[in-house]
Image: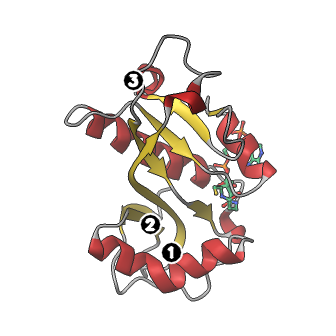
Amino acid sequence: MANFLIRAIQKRDKTEDFDCGHQALNAFLKKTASQYHKKGYARIRVMVDKNDTVFAYNTLSSAQIVSAELSNVVVRQLPRHPMPVLLIGRLAVCRSQQGKGFGEEMLMDALKRSVETADTIGVFGVVVDPISNAAERFYARYGFQVCKNTPKRMFISVKTLKQLF
Ligand SMILES: CC(C)(COP(=O)(O)OP(=O)(O)OC[C@H]1O[C@@H](n2cnc3c(N)ncnc32)[C@H](O)[C@@H]1OP(=O)(O)O)[C@@H](O)C(=O)NCCC(=O)NCCS
């Protein structure tokens, strides 16, 4: 990690060669991410080297989850209205750097910010929509659980995260 820095995305960042193995995640970083960040649709953080070449990124935004989705994950009764959560919409590491702990670094970066946000505004948990079975296994390692009625959505509570950070 010594040669890399995690910070908010900037327009000058070099993304041309980024390839995480998923075209949709590559295209988002190259074409859309900077505008999304600027307009506040999501906060996007990148892992860059000293030349501002991007090797990993994550996105964080607000979202809602209905309590029925959580019936297999959360034991106690929840309000009937949608619950406020944060969404890690995208997280990717370029193929040349995978398997070196950077995916975990980028996940922890988003989760730490989620816990900090939950001190200021109501946030019940964090959700992710894994892009593949491999991504689902990656998130499961950190305690994310598959939501009942939305199989491609996973959840972890802020209460659980507070034990981590
Ligand atoms: C999934 C992804 C983010 C993981 O990043 P990474 O840098 O390769 O992962 P790390 O090196 O940080 O691995 C952290 C831990 O997760 C494990 N892990 C990584 N990928 C895994 C997978 N697909 N399934 C199960 N475990 C996995 C590692 O073995 C490691 O555990 P260890 O420390 O006990 O060995 C990366 O492979 C990627 O960008 N994939 C393509 C895009 C994608 O699937 N994004 C996911 C969100 S949509």
Q: Mark 1: which amino acid?
A: Val
Q: Are marks 1 and 2 in contact (CB under 8 Å)?
A: yes
| Element class at badge 1 | strand
To which residue does mark 1 refer?
A: 54
Picture quadrant of residue 75: top right
Residue at image x 29%, y 34%? 118
35 and 65: which one is in front?
Answer: 65
Q: Is residue 51 left or right of residue 122?
A: right
To which residue does mark 2 refer?
A: 46
Q: Is residue 49 above or below residue 27?
A: above
Cα distance between the residues tagged 1 and 2: 6 Å
Cα distance between the residues tagged 3 and 2: 24 Å
To which residue does mark 3 refer?
A: 162
Picture quadrant of residue 34: bottom left
The mark that comes first in sequence, 1 or 3, is: 1
Mark 2: few/some/many CA within 10 Å (<14, 14-19, 20+): many
Residue at image x 61%, y 29%? 143
Query: Does any atom of ligand 1 lie closer than 8 Å to the CB of label 1?
Result: no
Q: Is residue 35 above or below residue 122?
A: below
The mark that comes first in sequence, 1 or 2, is: 2
Residue 114: where, in percent of width, then height? 36, 41
| Element class at badge 3 | helix
Residue at image x 51%, y 52%? 106
The mark that comes first in sequence, 3 or 2, is: 2
Q: Mark 3: which amino acid?
A: Lys
Q: Is residue 163 left or right of residue 21?
A: left
Residue at image x 54%, y 77%? 28
Q: Mark 2: which amino acid?
A: Val
